[in-house]
Image: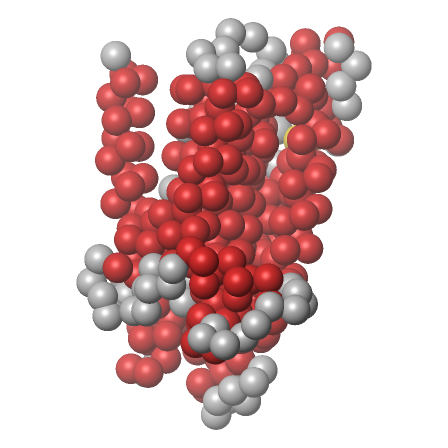
Amino acid sequence: MKQRVQPRTLFICLTFLCLLAVWLSLALGPVSLPLTDILRAGLRLLGMPIDRTGLEQAELILGQIRLPRTLLGLAVGAVLALSGVAMQGLFRNPLADPGLVGVASGAALGAAVAIVGGAWLGGIPEWFAPYLLSLCAFIGGLGVTALVYRLGRRNGQTDVATMLLAGIAMTALGGSAVGLFTYLADDATLRTLTFWNLGSLNGASYERLWPLLLVALGVTLWLPRRAQALNALLLGESEARHLGIDVEGLKRELVFCTALGVGAAVAAAGLIGFIGLVVPHLVRLVAGPDHRVLLPASLLAGGTLLLFADLVARLALAPAELPIGIVTAFIGAPFFLFLLVRRGR
């Protein structure tokens, strides 16, 4: 497969950008932290016997606020980008998006049920609210994706075109249901629902982070093992079968990994669009379509892009904070239009 940039050069550049994004994410904010304080406070958090004199503020900010937020941004961006690669490989279309199988709309519907339903029931205990919201969003995403997959089954095989149409229909249905809950919500609940639908890394905590990290680790380890099968699928389903690929099994794995990853990401950070579309396509333009390079490169690029978007969201209107979904939409929508124009030509 033709490559425009050597993989080694690409990974060196992406690793440098990722480290830069992590450093800026940890350093910048209402209180700026020098690199030396970040390193010393980080070593203390790891249990190293470093003198704490003068590090009290840096250790508190780093350990309780910025480190979980940075890790959450890396995990969400990586999972969304990997899911985008999986969907583009499944549909054999570089303009495909993880939302095509309905997982994002299902997660949004689950979150709306938790937020508005909890208000109708007289409120949810404050300590339990984040867990209920994440659980409902995760279950909603998996449930809608399972239904879409079932609707796409015909005579023991998965028809990708039918699954695509079912995903579009379920996305529209989920959007209308969320709109109904939005209409029925009171002012306080409406504000919560609106901000969740716009996506944010604000309020990141280790309790929200660990489930996502486990899912991200599983998706990150599993999908690259299917790189050769995805390369074969690019040739067509019949050709892939002749090469010994279990196409139906591969489809199930791709749909399941996407539902699991996007469901966990949306449950942790709300709806964040365009990462799964923009990142794989950008990497494909730079490095070519080989999934052995595309998958790990998209993982790095997805986490990096989301951290830079989060920096813009935090600093553009400081001390106020933009929802990160707005920033990614400002980045992704013009890029998507550019792709459409370029594809038309």
Q: Between residue 210 and residue 183, name the one nearer to us.
A: 210
Q: Is residue 105 visible?
A: no
Q: Quadrant of residue 341?
A: top left
Q: Which residue shows up at 36% across the image and 47% down it?
A: 308
What x and y, as percent, mark residue 53? 50, 77
Q: Is residue 44 visible?
A: yes
What x and y, as percent, mark residue 66? 45, 64
Residue farthest toward the left in the current orientation of the protein? 317
Can you say whether 285 is above or below 3 in the image?
A: below
What colouring style does the render use? secondary structure
Q: Quadrant of residue 247?
A: top right
Q: Is residue 143 left or right of residue 114?
A: right
Q: Quadrant of residue 190?
A: bottom left
What x and y, as percent, mark residue 164? 51, 35
Can you say whether 195 is above or below 118 in the image?
A: above
Q: Is residue 224 left or right of residue 89?
A: right
What x and y, as percent, mark residue 257? 65, 43
Q: Which residue shows up at 61% across the image and 57% down it?
A: 212
Q: Between residue 98 and residue 175, name the one nearer to us.
A: 98
Q: How many marks?
A: 0
Q: Which residue shows up at 71% across the image and 37% down it?
A: 222
Q: Is residue 96 left or right of residue 222?
A: left
Can you say whether 184 is above or below 89 in the image?
A: below
Q: Quadrant of the C terminus?
A: top left
Q: Which residue shows up at 66% across the image and 52% down it?
A: 215
Q: Quadrant of the N terminus?
A: top right
Q: Between residue 265 and residue 312, name the one nearer to us.
A: 312
